[in-house]
Amino acid sequence: MSRADAPRTATRIVVLTGAGLSAESGLATFRDSGGLWEQHAIEDVATPQAFRRNPDLVQRFYNDRRRQARKAQPNEAHRALARLSLRDDVMLVTQNVDDLLDRAGARGVVHMHGALNRGVCANCGHRFQVDGDLTTDDPCPSCGQASLRPDIVWFGEMPQQMDEILHALQAASIFAAIGTSGEVYPAAGFVEIAHDHGAECVEINLDPRRSSPLFDRHLAGPATMTVPAWVDDILGSAPTEP
Ligand code: BV8
């Protein structure tokens, strides 16, 4: 029976990842020094108003990031989470818009802030794969209108698949936040929901100094070290020696 038609077991583990997961693959984080936002003010590139005001700047910002993401490779942390995602009771939610988890083989990744390799038509809602650059003059493959934008959730827009995420958080017995500063909502509020519903909350971060007191455990260090160890612990067995 394929995973798609297997009876859906209740989600026991919810993992939320942020830019720190892809840092060791060479993709800039947002708020560490030299992060993405320091080169661009958020309001200049990641809001619907910015897109209306200067669509070419916003398209260029995402075209650059799409090229960087395509050149990047999944790291050991992505691969460990891909192993974990093969369990039916695990939900991987990412704030990241790169596809490194998917390329590492993870199944059913929930891209709550959208994805660089997807575009959407602001006129008809048609979603489509984007491999190269996206420009505002391109006609929509479905309605023909020149109203294409990156399928990215900007500030002030509702993140995607929130109902599924909230349902999973209420059922989870383990919640792990990996490589996220916990500054952007509603993702930053997930630990509170999981905690209030009795989950053990684990924070895996390079620098756990500013984390929420709601986390029960902290694993400090680079994701490529901490995440494989945590996943092997969860799966109950260290990988067999090669
Ligand atoms: C919404 C897509 C409403 C774009 C992104 C005041 C209070 C509460 C909320 C708000 C508020 N004012 C405004 C808001 C709302 C706003 C918000 O939260 N603003 C913040 C700044 C206060 N939120 C929104 O607008 C959201 N929408 O609220 O909608 C609504 C309701 C009804 C109907 C309609 C609408 C939408 C938010 C989504 C915005 N889009 N991304 C893009 O990617 O270009 S957010 C952006 O930040 C990225 O997705 C990024 O992933 C995310 C969070 O950042 P992090 O991933 O955490 O990255 P960061 O650099 O911050 O941290 C990296 C971490 O990794 C650090 O902790 C570091 O220590 C660690 N690290 C580094 N290296 C490593 C490592 N860890 C391990 N190993 C390493 N090697």
Image (spheres, helix red, strand yellow):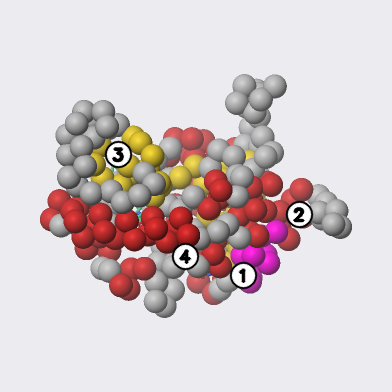
User: Nearer the N terminus, badge 3 or badge 4?
Assistant: 4
Looking at the image, can residue 186 be seen? no
The residue under the point 71% across, 54% down is 231
Q: Secondary structure at mark 3?
A: strand
The residue singled out by tag 2 in the image is 232
Q: Residue furthest left?
A: 53
In whole angstroms, how far apart are the C-alphas of marks 1 and 3?
A: 34 Å
In whole angstroms, how far apart are the C-alphas of marks 2 and 3?
A: 38 Å
Quadrant for ligand 1 reads bottom left
The residue under the point 17% across, 34% down is 145
Decide: few, some or many residues near mark 2? Use Cα within 10 Å; few <14, some 14-19, many ≥20.
Answer: some
**Residue 53 at what x, y percent from top left?**
13, 55
Q: Which quadrant of the figure has residue 219? A: bottom right
In whole angstroms, how far apart are the C-alphas of marks 4 and 2?
A: 25 Å
The residue singled out by tag 4 in the image is 27
Q: Amino acid at mark 3?
A: Val
> In the image, is residue 92 part of the stretch drawn in magenta?
no
User: Nearer the N terminus, badge 2 or badge 1?
Assistant: 1
Q: Are marks 2 and 1 in contact (CB under 8 Å)?
A: no
Q: Which quadrant of the figure has residue 163? A: top left
The residue singled out by tag 3 in the image is 120
Q: Secondary structure at mark 1?
A: loop
User: Mark 1 against mark 4, which lies toward the viewer?
Assistant: 4
The residue singled out by tag 1 in the image is 222
User: Nearer the N terminus, badge 1 or badge 4?
Assistant: 4
In whole angstroms, how far apart are the C-alphas of marks 2 and 1?
A: 16 Å
User: Mark 4 against mark 2, which lies toward the viewer?
Assistant: 4
